[in-house]
Image (cartoon, rainbow, N blue to C red):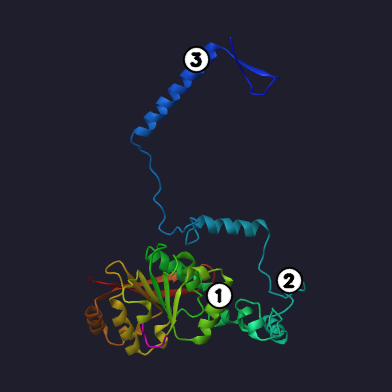
């Protein structure tokens, strides 16, 4: 017999292993290693699902799946939840936005500093109008619609975190926040002319969403001047959500002329929402010719429904048709 004891001295308890048992154990281990090595060296016929093109660093999907919708509906039903009138109740939200704003004005903001700005320890002192999110009501439809736009554009263009995106008229980042969160740093560009919108975007939305580290390139401009984004940039997606409606046709065409060469050939896309009157007012053949002269091709229109409210948008799709 061979005995193996614990290393403590003096020994208190021992484990006795017979020689035949030890030989058997070694034989089993050798056979296991042989079959494991064989399985690793043999070609694998296993099939794995392809990676989703819409997965970020954490594996999140861009869009909610049908299973996601079923799950949340089950949660609503299971908890016996019903739509109720939004009545303010003490202890839940006792003040309206207007009342909150009055308090912020009266008490000089949530930091309560009376001294000069140099003595204010708030990193980004924010106007009360932004803190109560009044700018969320500036779009004629719910703020939540920004997610709908992002989902449609991301899936229509097979977006990846390394894609380069330009929004013309990003406002206060109702849509842009979702792109900024998904894309790698500095991959989201925006040209916006409205100063108040830019203040809301930079002084409230980005800090409050924890997205300052994404360093989006947001430029104030009014004349379709894209030079500040650099000459070497090449975009996977350029989009304008209801912005061209408010521009003179000649300025829209100026922008398209300047952007055509910055769109990736064939794979890059330009999306314009609501209508393309800048094009249709010229007449079909003349518009097609003018687009062709710029190296652009009209691919048609798509309709996208909202996830949360009774609303849909029509998007017009263009691509760069030559290198």
The earlier-in-sequence mark between 3 and 2 is 3
* Mark 2–mark 1 CB contact (< 8 Å): no
| Residue 240 forms part of the magenta stretch | no
Q: Give the range drawn in magenta.
A: 221-226
- Look at the numbered disc 1 and give the secondary structure of its residue: helix
Residue 169 in percent (x, y) is at: 44, 81
Dividing the picture into quadrants, the one containing residue 262 is bottom left
Residue 270 in percent (x, y) is at: 34, 74
Q: Which residue is at the far top?
A: 1
* Numbered mark located on residue 23 in the image: 3
Residues at marks 3 and 2, CA–CA distance in whole angstroms: 72 Å
**Looking at the image, residue 36 lies above or below residue 218:** above
The earlier-in-sequence mark between 2 and 1 is 2
Relative to residue 6, is residue 148 drawn left or right?
left
Dividing the picture into quadrants, the one containing residue 72 is bottom right
Residue 223 in percent (x, y) is at: 37, 88
Q: Is the magenta stretch mostly helix, strand or loop?
A: loop
Name the residue: 47% across, 71% down.
Answer: 215
Counting every numbered tag in the picture gives 3
Which quarter of the image is occupied by the C terminus?
Answer: bottom left
Which quarter of the image is occupied by the N terminus?
Answer: top right
Residue 173 in percent (x, y) is at: 50, 76
Dot 2, how many residues are within 10 Å of its Cα: few (below 14), some (14-19), or many (20+)?
few
Residues at marks 3 and 1, CA–CA distance in whole angstroms: 69 Å
Q: Name the residue under label 1.
A: 205
Q: Mark 2 points at which residue?
A: 92
Residue in front for this viewpoint, 122 or 146: 122
Relative to residue 284, is residue 50 drawn left or right?
right
Relative to residue 181, is residue 94 drawn left or right?
right
- Look at the numbered disc 3 and give the secondary structure of its residue: helix
Q: Which is more foreground, mark 2 or mark 1?
A: 1
């Amino acid at each position: 017999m061979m005995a193996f004891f614990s290393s403590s001295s003096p020994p208190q308890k021992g484990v006795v292993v017979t020689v035949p048992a030890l030989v058997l154990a070694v034989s089993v281990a050798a056979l296991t290693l042989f079959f494991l090595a064989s399985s690793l060296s043999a070609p694998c016929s296993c099939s794995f699902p392809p990676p989703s093109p819409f997965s970020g660093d954490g594996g999140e999907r861009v869009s909610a799946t049908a299973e996601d919708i079923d799950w949340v509906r089950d949660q609503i039903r299971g908890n016996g939840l019903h739509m109720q009138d939004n009545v303010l109740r003490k202890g839940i939200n006792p003040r309206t936005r207007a009342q909150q704003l009055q308090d912020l004005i009266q008490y000089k903001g949530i930091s309560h500093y009376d001294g000069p700005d140099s003595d204010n320890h708030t990193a980004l002192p924010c106007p009360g109008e932004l803190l109560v999110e009044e700018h969320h009501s500036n779009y004629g439809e719910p703020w939540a619609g920004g997610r709908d736009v992002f989902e449609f554009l991301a899936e229509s263009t097979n977006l990846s975190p390394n894609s380069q995106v330009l929004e013309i008229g990003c406002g206060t980042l109702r849509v842009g926040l979702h792109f900024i969160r998904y894309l790698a740093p500095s991959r989201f560009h925006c040209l916006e002319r409205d100063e108040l919108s830019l203040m809301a975007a930079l002084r409230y939305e980005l800090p409050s969403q924890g997205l300052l580290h994404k360093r989006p390139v947001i430029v104030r401009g009014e004349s379709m001047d894209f030079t500040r984004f650099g000459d070497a940039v090449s975009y996977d997606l350029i989009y304008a959500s209801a912005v061209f409606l408010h521009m003179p046709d000649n300025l829209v065409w100026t922008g398209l002329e300047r952007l055509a060469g910055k769109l990736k050939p064939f794979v890059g896309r330009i999306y314009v929402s609501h209508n393309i009157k800048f094009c249709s007012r010229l007449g079909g053949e003349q518009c097609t010719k003018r687009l062709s002269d710029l190296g652009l091709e009209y691919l048609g229109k798509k309709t996208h429904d909202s996830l949360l409210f009774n609303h849909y948008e029509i998007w017009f799709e263009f691509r760069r048709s030559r290198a």
